[in-house]
Amino acid sequence: MTDALPFAGEPEDSHEAIMRATFCALQEHGYAGLSIQRIADKADLSKSTFYHHFDGKEDLLLSFLEFTLEEFDRVFQLESSGDPATDLQTFFGLLLGDFPTVDGMPEQEDILATYVELRAQAVRNPDFRAKFTETDQKFTDRIATLIEEGREDGAFRDVDAERTAQFLLTTLEGITLQNATRDDNPLPQMREAMESYIENELLVEDHTES
Amino acid sequence: MTDALPFAGEPEDSHEAIMRATFCALQEHGYAGLSIQRIADKADLSKSTFYHHFDGKEDLLLSFLEFTLEEFDRVFQLESSGDPATDLQTFFGLLLGDFPTVDGMPEQEDILATYVELRAQAVRNPDFRAKFTETDQKFTDRIATLIEEGREDGAFRDVDAERTAQFLLTTLEGITLQNATRDDNPLPQMREAMESYIENELLVEDHTES
């Protein structure tokens, strides 16, 4: 999987093949309907191959969670546009589904819905909880760095970068949760609200008007 | 169940007894570990009594979701303090767990975690999705009314009440999600961030300084 996109290209080994099969089985059957048998069917592998790699479903899913979060973290690496506000909007867009997918792979909204299903498992699973704590911190750091760059650049106000980043990530996760669990498609409206927030609360007025 | 608190007091009939048993079984076993048998054990009722009331687990859980959301909606009815900012903070506090519970009932944080587990089911269950869409709208309306009262009172700025209410509810749900799925207890810090938001973005400065 040397391609730029998560789960794109030919899997390089059986671990990658299993990760991709898990991804597809999750999309199709949801977390509750997931079984080693179903993943094995998708991967065209025997169940014994699975048990060679993993202790069981819980172990496989933790491995899958680690793999996926790392893949997305990699895709979310940005090349700066030179404009901090644009970089921040681009990063938020990625978290809300503006990432490319490939033919035969699930749509962005379905991927975000799977994220919500996996995240809810962290309520009962301490390993998942540790992983999401780590990823939230990683994304918070990334947003805080973009805010600091904007401050140094004079584009952003003198806000507390870490605290603002936490607040923004929380709101982004709220948007993801609502969009996956409501039938009135709140995403476009909430994206606008996020853009207004950045415009009104972060941007220095003189800077944007020039 | 004539008491003010959800699930407090003696259940009035077998429907209420089943709702309470479902609540307790959910806390103990989580959504994935829930079964009619486990709920029947908690309620000290036979499985046949269950099937007299409900078609199955999905039907029972939808009924439970409706019952619980209505109970909390009832508890969340506020008597105005006369100060719109205080009323808004109080309402947000309720959504984040500042509601009373009774001996023998789960802690607030556990109730919110169960909310996250149920909400994630809406990814795959259209009936749940319809219910959460309706409840989100109800809470948004409630927040928008509080914001409008604050505007009329001169305490709040001239913001778009509906849009601001949506943004705030989204953030509150993001806080609930993060708090239930992370191990670094982000709730106190996020509550502070919400309070800052209200202070900085909603309150009219002259009004608060007077």
Image (cartoon, coloured by chain):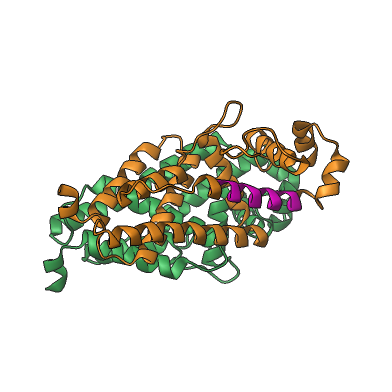
Chain colours: A green, B orange
Q: Residue at x 30, y 66 (%)?
A: A196
Indicate left or right for A45 with B198 as reference.
right
- Classified by dominant secondary structure, the portion drawn in magenta counts as helix
Q: Is residue A26 above or below residue A200?
A: above
| Region rendered in magenta | B58-72
Quarter the N terminus of chain B occupies = top right
Q: Is residue B197 above or below residue A184?
A: above
Q: Residue at x 16, y 52 (%)?
A: A158
Q: Residue at x 82, y 35 (%)?
A: B45
Rendered location of residue A47, percent (x, y): 74, 46
Looking at the picture, tell me which residue is in the foreground, B135 or A34: B135
Rendered location of residue A6, percent (x, y): 50, 59
Q: Is residue B62 magenta?
A: yes
Q: Disc count in the image?
A: 0
Return the residue found at the far top: B103
Residue B137 in view in this figure: yes
Indicate left or right for B38 with B115 as reference.
right
Rendered location of residue A125, percent (x, y): 57, 37
The picture quadrant where one finds residue A152 is bottom left
Looking at the picture, tell me which residue is in the foreground, B39 or B186: B39
Q: Is residue A173 magenta?
A: no
Residue A64 in view in this figure: no
Q: Residue at x 32, y 46 (%)?
A: B86
Q: Is residue B78 above or below residue A56?
A: below
Rendered location of residue A73, percent (x, y): 41, 53
Looking at the picture, tell me which residue is in the foreground, B94 or A103: B94
